[in-house]
Image: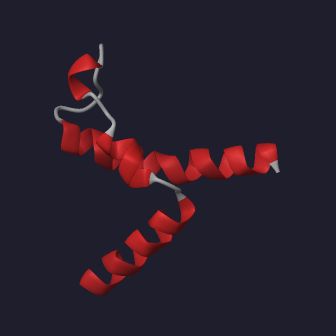
Amino acid sequence: MFKLMKVHMKVMVNEIPYIDDLTNSIDYASIDKPKSSNLLEHNIALSNALPEIVSKLKKKYK
């Protein structure tokens, strides 16, 4: 399972440029209606949604 996660994380990092910058710049306290109970859950949800968003943006602006 660790190997699978390691490969998955490499793919995600390659798909999403500057993902660390995006997740580190989040000010969770300023979110009006958070959909998660803490910053970690928010970052996980964001990491799951970003590949789809980034691929749509890449297709749109190519």
In the image, residue 43 lies at what x, y percent?
Answer: 30, 44
Please, is residue 53 above or below residue 14 in the view? above
In the image, residue 52 lies at what x, y percent?
Answer: 58, 50
Q: How is the image coloured?
A: secondary structure
Please, is residue 7 above or below residue 17 in the view? below
Q: Residue furthest left?
A: 38
Quarter occupied by the N terminus: bottom left
Q: Nearer the viewer, residue 25 or 4?
A: 25
Q: In this image, 37 relative to 49: left or right?
A: left
Residue 34 sits in quarter: top left
Residue at position x 31%, y 86% from top? 3
Residue 61 sits in quarter: top right
Please, is residue 25 above or below residue 48 in the view? above
Residue at position x 30%, y 28% from top? 35
In the image, residue 49 lies at what x, y percent?
Answer: 47, 46
Q: In this image, 21 relative to 37: left or right?
A: right
Q: In this image, 6 relative to 16: left or right?
A: left
Q: Residue furthest right?
A: 62
Q: Nearer the viewer, residue 6 or 23?
A: 23
Q: Residue furthest bottom?
A: 3
Residue at position x 17%, y 32% from top? 37
Residue at position x 32%, y 75% from top? 5
Q: Nearer the viewer, residue 19 or 38?
A: 19
* Count of all numbered marks drawn on residues in the image: 0
Q: Is residue 1 visible?
A: no
Q: Nearer the viewer, residue 16 or 48?
A: 16
Q: Is residue 12 visible?
A: yes
